[in-house]
Amino acid sequence: MQKLVNGVHNFQRGIFGSQREFFQKLVDGQRPMALFITCSDSRILPNLITQTEPGDLFIMRNAGNIIPAHGGNVGGGEAATIEFAVSVLGVPDVIVCGHTHCGAMKALLGPGEGLADMPATRKWLGHAAATRQIMRDKYTHLEGEALLTACVEENVLVQLENLRTHPVIAAGLARKALNLHGWVYKLATGDVFAFNPDEGQFAPLPRPRGVPADATPRASMLSI
């Protein structure tokens, strides 16, 4: 806990103090570039991965980057977060980002005994029941890490379909004012793979024109 307290003081003295004008502008409101839906896993830092600043991303996190289908989680915060991001903030892009070595997906693949004393988690993973069924029907030839990675990828696609059931998303897509993206972050390498619907598979994010493979990324104030 002391590390967290020290970090707050270091932020206030070092980063906030030197960027006071920037943070003051954020007081007037936010205009994020995207809604970023990802896992609660402590190893995933959306702003670090995307090298974005405060105000750039509207972030929603939960175990397994799961999005209950519309009406499937009465009282849950996911639907409200999605609605606010699209209707009020007007984000043009929504990203669902899974990651390798995901504990939630490992539990989803397991026999279930490990969730016996975790009723809330077991109920939550029910929103990924389609992912579990796909894995049982399509991936009996895989095991170990390969099976888990396939589960992570399939779950991103299932959650994108759940996302489409939300009225505000369906309306945005119909107006062509919204784009959906499926990503998977690889913990071991830092690579991000995006789903290519034309090829039906995940592939490395395309590199921007003029950016060499060994280019040094710009520094984010969050990493200073």
Image (cartoon, helix red, strand yellow):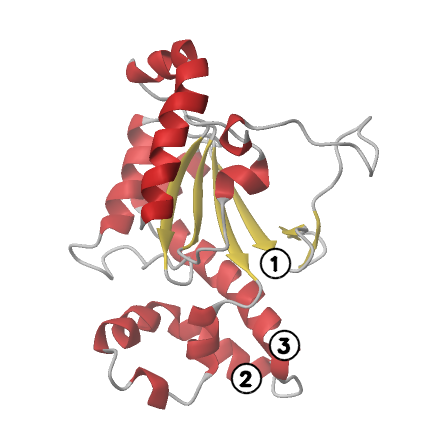
Eyeballing the image, is 153 above or below 163? below
Q: Position of residue 93 (x, y in %)?
A: 49, 35
Residue 220 visible in the picture:
yes
Q: Position of residue 179 (x, y in %)?
A: 51, 38
Residue 128 lies left or right of residue 142; in this view the side is: left
Eyeballing the image, is 73 above or below 117? above
- At label 3, counting other C-alpha atoms closer than 10 Å, the crowd grade (few under 14, some 14-19, many 20 or more) is few
Taking the spot 45% from the left edge, 38% from the top edge, the residue there is 173
Task: Name the residue carrying label 1.
Answer: 187
Tell me the mark number nearer the camera, choosing from 3 and 1.
1
Q: Looking at the rendering, which quadrant does residue 23 occupy?
A: top left
Task: Name the residue carrying label 2.
Answer: 137
Three-letter amino acid code at the position of disc 2: Asp
Residue 4 lies left or right of residue 177; in this view the side is: left
Give whichever of 221, 119 is nearer the camera. 221
What separation in Å lies between label 3 and label 2 (alpha carbons)?
A: 18 Å
Q: Position of residue 10 (x, y in %)?
A: 40, 30
Taking the spot 62% from the left edge, 27% from the top edge, the residue there is 219
Mark 3 and 1 residues: CB-CB less than 8 Å, in contact? no
Mark 1 and 2 residues: CB-CB less than 8 Å, in contact? no
The circle drawn on residue 145 is 3
Give whichever of 1, 72 is nearer the camera. 1
Name the secondary structure under disc 2: helix
